[in-house]
Image: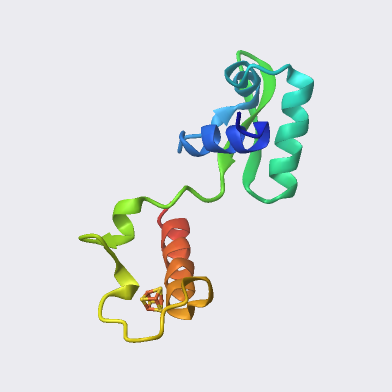
């Protein structure tokens, strides 16, 4: 089973408009106190924003992911990663600067488009 923090992040990321904290715990199947701890971890990790929100006069929080998961179709041209097309470097994916720079640029573009 997924780590509840990962599960909560995925759920929040799946809703670009955000998720109310008062509904998140029900969707995760945990109690509200545990949900608060999960949300605190995500907030401390700067993975989400927590915005005050009133629903039916009751104060809750709207949780929005700071960064959405990368869409795989943005990464591939055919079946090749975009920066790898025509690359003649000796390939060590874990240490590849062109790939890192490109992923970084992609994250910036996605953040500024929001
Ligand atoms: S070195 Fe980097 S850019 Fe080149 S093929 Fe490997 S992963 Fe792709």
Q: Is residue 98 above or below residue 37?
A: below
Residue at 61% in and 22% down: 28
Q: Quadrant of residue 49?
A: top right
Residue at left offset 49%, top offset 68%: 104
Q: Is residue 57 left or right of residue 41?
A: left
- Where residue 37 appears, as percent x and y from the top left, is 78, 32
Identify the residue at horizontal 56%, vertical 39% (top origin).
64
Q: Residue furthest top?
A: 56
In the orientation shown, which residue stands out farthest toward the left?
A: 78
Q: Is residue 69 above or below residue 105?
A: above
Q: Quadrant of ligand 1?
A: bottom left
Camera-side residue: 26 or 55? 26
User: Would residue 12 be found to the left or right of residue 44 on screen?
Assistant: left
Query: Residue at coordinates 61% horizontally, 23% vertically from top-left?
Result: 24
Q: Position of residue 80 (x, y in %)?
A: 27, 65
In-front residue for pair 72/23 = 72
Q: Nearer the viewer, residue 83 or 57?
A: 83
Number of numbered callouts drawn: 0
Q: In the image shown, does 68 or 111 lie closer to the viewer?
A: 68
Q: What is the basis of the colouring in this image?
A: rainbow
Please say if 85 is above or below 5.
below
Q: Is residue 109 above or below residue 95?
A: above
Q: Position of residue 15 (x, y in %)?
A: 46, 33
Which quadrant of the figure contains the N terminus? top right
Quadrant of the rendered structure where residue 30 is?
A: top right
Image x and y of residue 27, in percent: 57, 19
């Amino acid at each position: 089973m997924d780590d509840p923090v990962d599960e909560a992040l995925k759920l929040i990321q799946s809703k670009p408009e955000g998720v109310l904290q008062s509904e998140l715990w029900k969707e995760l199947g945990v109690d509200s106190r545990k949900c608060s701890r999960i949300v605190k971890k995500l907030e401390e990790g700067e993975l989400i924003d927590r915005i005050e929100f009133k629903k039916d006069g009751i104060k809750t929080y709207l949780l929005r992911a700071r960064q959405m998961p990368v869409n795989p179709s943005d990464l591939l041209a055919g079946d090749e990663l975009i920066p790898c097309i025509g690359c003649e470097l000796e390939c060590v994916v874990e240490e590849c600067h062109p790939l890192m720079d490109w992923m970084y640029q992609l994250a910036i573009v996605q953040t500024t488009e929001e």
